[in-house]
Image (cartoon, rainbow, N blue to C red):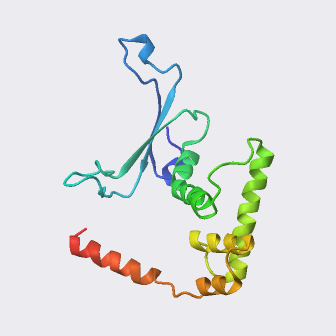
Amino acid sequence: MLSDKDLAAGVVRDAVVRMGLSSKADAKPDHLIRIIVIKAEPHAKRGGRRGKTAGPGNQGTIVIATNLLLVPAEIIALIYSYRWAIEIFFRFFKQILGCRHMLSQKPEGILIQVYCAIIACMLINLWTGKKPNKRMVEMLAFYFLGIASEQEVLNHLNRPDNTGIKLRAKEELWKKLGV
């Protein structure tokens, strides 16, 4: 039975099942699996290789399989709705700030590395007034290593930003392709 909060979060179905083939005892998982179906905005999947699709898009629902049996379905739906924010943070953390590998395996060491990366990002934003990107981080690293001069850093920071032009050209291309 779905609660009002579950329904408000877009949960359509919440069931606990045991998956696997019934004829083979070793093919079954040894634990229960929770299946949660959530309403989603329908979309067609883009991409794939030449002449082929990237697979079926969602038809208005997303199916989530989890082992979190005690967590309310509304919370799982909320976690799923924030998945891209989490992915974007870790992409930024790894690619832009250069934190591809953890320097420590202890929670305290990981916490220090994350704090240092976020503080560095905030300082770059305060110093430059711009959103940090990979090249900006590299240029500042070269400056602090003594490889780049102050003038080279200023020249790099004062270059015109063509992001809007590139985005408009990309959207025009998509329109021409009929996507």
Residue at 42% across / 17% down in the picture? 27
Residue at 62% across / 69% down in the picture? 138
Left or right for 79, reference 104: left
Task: Tell me residue 151's x, y (percent).
Answer: 67, 87
Q: On the rendered image, what quadrant is the C terminus found in?
A: bottom left
Residue at 52% across / 88% down in the picture? 160
| Quadrant assignment, res 159 | bottom right
Q: Residue furthest front?
A: 147
Left or right for 21, reference 177: right
Left or right for 143, reference 131: right
- State whether residue 32 is above or below residue 122: above
| Quadrant assignment, res 72 | top right
Residue at 71% across / 64% down in the picture? 118
Asked if residue 4 can be seen in this view, the reply is no
- State whether residue 28 is above or below residue 83: above
- State whether residue 3 is above or below residue 67: below
Asked if residue 143 can be seen in this view, the reply is yes
Relative to the observer, which residue lies in front, 81 or 136? 136
Task: Tell me residue 20's x, y (percent).
Answer: 40, 21
Relative to the observer, which residue lies in front, 150 or 172? 150
Relative to the observer, which residue lies in front, 106 or 14? 106
| Quadrant assignment, res 168 | bottom left
Tally the marks: 0
